[in-house]
Image: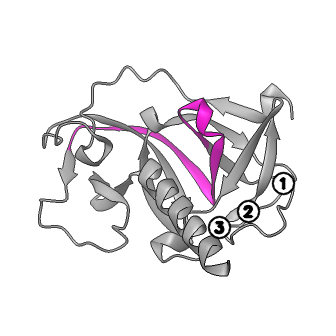
Amino acid sequence: MKAEDSETLPERDEPATMPAAAGGPAPASRARVRACLVVLGGEQFAIDVRRLREVMVVGKPTAVPGAPSFVRGVANLRGEVLALLDIAPALGLPACRVGPSSKALVLEPASSQVAIVVDEVVGLETFDEFRSHDDPVPATRAAFGVGWLEREGRLLTLLDVPEAVETLRIRAREAAASRG
C-alpha cells in the first residue's frame, strides 16, 4: 500500500482535557475537544484525535483463520501489518462493511498495530463543549463512551477507543480459554 492511500490527521494542538477513563482528570464542561467524526454500524460517533494516528484505505484485507469475529483481517500500511478490528458489534450495532475502498482509523500509539474499521469518515471538528457522563443525557449507544459532544442539536458519543479495543482483547482471551 502506498503512502497516498492514507491521510495523516492534523496536528493535535487543540487544547483539550484528557477524559477520566483515559487516566486524566475529569473533563471540564467547557473543555475543547478535537474529534474525528465517524459512522459505525450506521450511527455517528466522535473519537478524540489524540487517540488516532491516521486514516487508511483498507484495500484487500487478509483473513485470519480462527480469529474472533471482530477481527476483520489484517492489512499492510507501508510495510506495517495492522489488525483490522470492528468495534461496532460491541456497541450493539451491525458490523461495518469492509471492502477495497473501506477506511480504518489507525490507533495511537503506533506500537498497538491496530486499526478500527469504520463505515465512513465524516471529518474533523473542534467542539467547544464536552458533556461528561455525569450530565443527564440519554445513554443510548454509550458503551465505551466517555461523554457526549453536541453537533447540530444532536448528541454524539465520544468513544474511548482504547477501552473498546482492550475489552475486545479480553473477550477474545476468555473465549480462547473456554475452548481449551
Classed neighbour count for the residue bearing mark 1: other residues with Cα under 10 Å, few (<14), some (14–19), many (≥20) = some
Q: Residue at x 27, y 31 (%)?
A: 16
Instruction: Report helix, strand or loop for mark 3.
Output: loop
Q: Nearer the viewer, residue 61 or 71?
A: 71
Which SS class for mark 2? strand
Real-space Cα separation, disc 3 to disc 2, in angstroms: 6 Å
Residue 125 in which image quadrant: top left
Q: Which residues are magenta?
A: 106-129
Please identify the residue farthest to the front as the structure is shown: 180
Q: Looking at the image, is 154 positioned above or below residue 162?
A: below
Marks 2/1 in contact by CB < 8 Å: the verdict is yes
Q: Quarter of the image containing the C terminus? A: bottom right
What residue is drawn where x is 62% and y is 62%? 86
At 82% from the left edge and 61% from the top edge, which residue is drawn? 64
| Residue corresponding to mark 2 | 72
Viewed as shown, does residue 25 lie left or right of 119? Answer: left
Q: Tell me the amino acid under the disc marked 3.
A: Phe
Disc sitting over residue 61 in the figure: 1
User: Residue at 19% across / 59% down in the picture?
Assistant: 133
**Image spot of residue 163 (x, y percent):** 42, 53
Q: What residue did someone put label 3 on?
A: 70
Q: Depth-wise, is mark 1 or mark 3 nearer the camera? A: 3
Toward which corner of the image does residue 82 lie, by quadrant?
A: top right
Whether tag 3 and tag 2 are in contact, CB under 8 A, the answer is yes
